[in-house]
Amino acid sequence: MTQTARLNTARLADLPPDVARPAYDRKAMKTGIVHLGIGAFHRAHQAVYTDAVIASGDLWWGIVGASLRSPDTRDALKAQDGLYTLAVRSGEGEKLAVIGAIREVVVAPENPAALVERMSHPDVKVVTLTVTEKGYCHDPATGRLDEKHPDVVHDLANLNRPRSAIGFLAAAIARRRSLGLAPFTVLSCDNLPSNGRTLHRILTRFAELVSPDLGAYVRDKIACPDSMVDRIVPATTDEDRAAVAARLGLADAWPVMTEPFTQWVIEDHFPSGRPAWETVGATLVTDVAPYEAMKLRLLNGSHSAIAYLGYLAGYQTVSEAMADANLASYVAALMDDTTATLTIPPGADVEAYKRSLRERFRNPALKHRTWQIAMDGSQKLPQRLLGTIRDRLAAGSDIARHALAVAAWMRYVTGTDEKGDAIDVRDPLAQDLAAIARSAGGDPAALARAIAGVEAVFGTDLPAEPRFVTAVGEALVGLYRDGARATLASLAHG
């Protein structure tokens, strides 16, 4: 950072007049929310909604954020009194706002008991999570707890110093119960199918393994409402930091970049109370499922397809990839294929939604890297692409376009791109997938069959379905033979 002056509470008055900032008394905030997984997405989404609620005069809902792995966010925000800049970017320009909802950031591995203590405070009514799909220590193909996961094994033996989000939740629930405190509501904000119900199932099973009594308590007393979140949030770069600092006249170690669009749909089931998020733009409903499926399959499914095909085609960002007319044509057709599997929410205009998604993907002001979206594909494919494939197979429909996206993922996780250069594959199954790729001996058809047999991703049904294995195999052969760009061109003009 080149500026010596740092964004903090004392310097809020020094900000340019066009930069929004907290006008409320941050010292008077209570801590009503603990958030697990305090990354860029939370700070560009849920924290922004909550900041708006606090600004309306409800000071109960200050946030304690917890990092379950790295101290980076804590180290960046501590000197800034938890303040950070939200930069909303579009082709029309950039708007900046300083967000004040985060009171403190703790690093769980440094002192696990301290995080459990904060979650056990009587003021805490809601615990929210953005820990990514892999943070749930579950089998993505079944949605159930992975009882052999190293963090699960550790936490069951050491519940007083957990590592996983599930372990921290169980430890805090047990502690609150022993103190006679009302349970908090647990709100997942991750891209899981029926994320609240999935979390409740995982958490209940973990608690049962701790003790049958705790398992029954979690099953009967802990509310885990479903939610759907939507906002594109690229990783912050040094270039972003420099640009924000130039606008602020102050250094901000960890601003967040995002788009104008934001959506949050929440099942309204909070027995212990919640912020009035509906007053600041969130949608509270009785059934999130139709919204969730539309978003997961149309936005996230298309995003993953763009990430793998775009990366293989040599595009570093989503907007660059969408500038390729053939890839953009493929994405539009993929969305149309997906639409047939959806139950459209009442009043929703799905055609307008698909057009808006493609426009968002084209936003040149967001440098959303294909490599970033490509991370953890083994955890993402089941809900983003494979559910759609299963529904289309059941309907007797063609799956060629979705099979191509799956094949692109298989090509990507081999760890070598079309030029023979190494790919930095970030995935919990990266080593296993690389070993499978080596065993295939360079035969794309054999590679497709072998990776399709990974039960943790594809379950037991898809590997036994000839239409699926054949479609993915043919697509992977084509990608190896022709490359991603030529494959997309042939689809567009075939």
Image: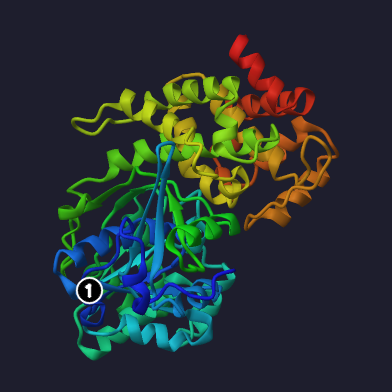
Asked which secondary structure carries label 1, the reply is: loop
Structural crowding at the residue carrying mark 1, measured as other residues with C-alpha within 10 Å and reported as few (<14), some (14–19) or many (≥20): many
**Considering only vertical position in the picture, is 185 above or below 490?**
below
Q: State which quarter of the image contains the C terminus.
A: top right
368, above or below 42, in the image: above
Residue 92 percent location from the top left of the image = 40, 37
Please name the residue shown 82% across and 46% down the image. Answer: 438
Residue 38, x across and y down, in percent: 44, 67
Residue 149 as seen in the image, left or right of residue 82: right
Q: Residue furthest top?
A: 494
Label 1 sits on residue: 125
Q: Position of residue 343 (x, y in %)?
A: 29, 31
Amino acid on which disc 1 is placed: Lys
x and y, in percent, of residue 228 in the image: 32, 48
Residue at screen point 50% across, 52% down: 140
The image quarter in which residue 313 lies: top right
Residue 410 visible to the viewer? yes
Pick whichever, 84 or 345, lies toward us. 84
| 482, 51: nearer the viewer | 51
